[in-house]
Amino acid sequence: MRKKIVAGNWKMNMTPSQGAILVTDITRQLVKDLDVQIVICPPYTSIDRVARVIRETKWVFCGAQDCHVQLSGAFTGDISAAMLQEMGVRYVILGHSERRKYYHEDDILVAEKIKTAIGEGIRPIYCCGEELQERETNQQFEVVEMQIETALFGLSPEQMSEVVIAYEPVWAIGTGKTATPGQAQEMHEFIRGMIAEKFGDDIASKLSILYGGSCKPENAHELFSQPDIDGGLIGGASLDADAFVKIIQSF
Ligand code: PGA
């Protein structure tokens, strides 16, 4: 009914030549006609090499890790969605907790970036999730509700149909601590419920909601077996071809 997606977020890892080797290794191990869409999100400088390898496969897509809110202009050091689109990028991660933490991005800005990306034909993977202290004080639902309302509720239904959501509890990212399948399912169900209330059941039932945060071969199967978990956004484990392929095969 809805797309299963496994996306690899390479973060600031992999030079162009290293990235080409890794993506070749991944695609070689995968069987064709998988029921899962695979998205590889290299750093900007490795996109071209990765996209060239992927182009021959048709079932693996290239993603980016961010884009600017404007399409062009005097923004030294930035990259626009139009530039990414021309390079073959079909997905873009937006609102990742590391962008929020190190670049002070908030959901008001991310909401605009989402519209810009969709306008260029790039599907946003919108990241949301609470911090440890918010989880410890049981505020996780309030926090995620506010993030989703601010980032997504200004979209039209057509725009919302292009969005993929990644629930990434900040305390689980790169820490080795994973949300339990129950904790993740509970939040994914909550998010789908919010989207259904605002945009209707049809859009909500087709929405892919990925889990991210220390997802690895050992826990992927149990996470992906939950009814509202439609795949994963994988950081560390996506840098190892065997581990990443095992995660994909967990479906
Ligand atoms: P991790 O990162 O898998 O290394 O925890 C996930 C992410 O940041 O998207």
Image: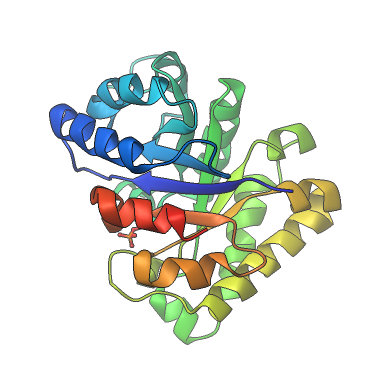
User: Who's the residue at 21% across and 43% down the image?
Assistant: 12
Question: Which residue extends farthest front?
Answer: 31
User: Who's the residue at 84% across and 53% down the image?
Assistant: 201
In this view of the protein, can residue 105 be seen by the observer? no
In this view of the protein, can residue 109 be seen by the observer? yes
Residue sitting nearer the eye, 206 or 98: 206
Residue sitting nearer the eye, 84 or 101: 84
User: Who's the residue at 21% across and 34% down the image?
Assistant: 19
Q: Quadrant of residue 35?
A: top right
**Rendering coords of residue 246 (x, y %):** 37, 57
Q: How many marks?
A: 0
User: Who's the residue at 58% across and 65% down the image?
Assistant: 144
Q: Is residue 208 left or right of residue 128?
A: right
**Rendering coords of residue 100 (x, y %):** 38, 52
Relative vertical location of residue 41 with respect to residue 250 in this rendering, above or below: above
**Rendering coords of residue 192 (x, y %):** 71, 60
Residue sitting nearer the eye, 164 or 18: 18
**Rendering coords of residue 53 (x, y %):** 32, 24
Relative vertical location of residue 3 with respect to residue 209 in this rendering, above or below: above
Task: Say how the picture is coloured.
Answer: rainbow
- Ligand 1 is found in the corner quadrant, namely bottom left
Relative vertical location of residue 88 with respect to residue 37 in this rendering, above or below: above
